[in-house]
Amino acid sequence: MIRHVILWKLKDGFGEEEKARIKTGIKAGLEDLAGRIPGLVSITVDISGVSGSTADAMLDSTFEDGAALEVYSKHPAHVSVAENKVRPFVQTRLCLNFEV
């Protein structure tokens, strides 16, 4: 299995209410992909970082294998969430994929 972890930092300039709305949208959009993409075993987005965190949101997902991760990356449902709920608001993205 492959674990796919992403950390995002939102762009500067958003107020706290707007950041909360954006993070909630990212969480809802990505977690809604559960059961819709072949090979996606689990998906969770955490938006509740504590003081001292340098990221605003984290995706923690697991895939059956590398091929399933590739399918996810190109799946229209995932691409739609990425293009509409994530990329327009994100300044920095860090990714770590590893075998579990």
Image (spheres, rainbow, N blue to C red):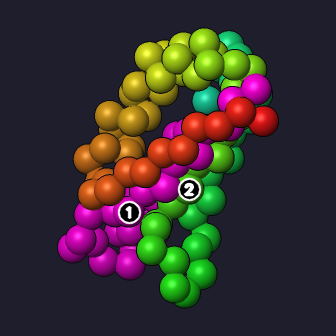
Q: Residue at x 39, y 36 (%)?
A: 82
Q: Is residue 63 above or below residue 26?
A: above
x and y percentages locating residue 86 in the rendered image: 38, 45
Three-letter amino acid code at the position of disc 1: Lys
Q: Pointer 1: residues within 10 angstroms few (<14), some, or many (20+)?
A: some
Q: CA distance from mark 2 to mark 1?
A: 9 Å
Rendering coords of residue 67 (x, y %): 60, 12
Q: Is residue 80 visible?
A: yes
- Residue located farthest toward the bottom when viewing the structure as drawn: 51
Location of residue 83 (image quadrant)? top left
- Tell which circle, 2 or 1, labels the residue nearer the N-terminal end: 1
Q: Is residue 31 visible?
A: no
Residue drawn at 24 percent across, 71 percent down: 12
Q: Mark 2 — residue?
A: 58
Residue extending furthest toward the left: 13
Q: Residue at x 52, y 17 (%)?
A: 70
Dot 2 amino acid type: Met
Q: Quadrant location of the C terminus?
A: top right
Write the start and end of the magenta stretch as one range.
1-30
Where does residue 38 sit, x and y in percent of width and height?
A: 68, 13
Q: Is residue 5 above or below residue 100?
A: below
Is 73 in the magenta?
Answer: no
Q: Of residues 54 and 11, which is closer to you in this image?
A: 54
Mark 2 crowd level (few <14, some 14–19, many ≥20, 10 Å Cα): many
Disc 2, SS: strand
Q: Which residue is mark 1?
A: 9
Residue at 26% across, 63% down:
11
Position of 27 relative to 36 (above/below): below
The label shown at residue 64 is: none
Query: Which structural element holds mark 1?
Result: strand
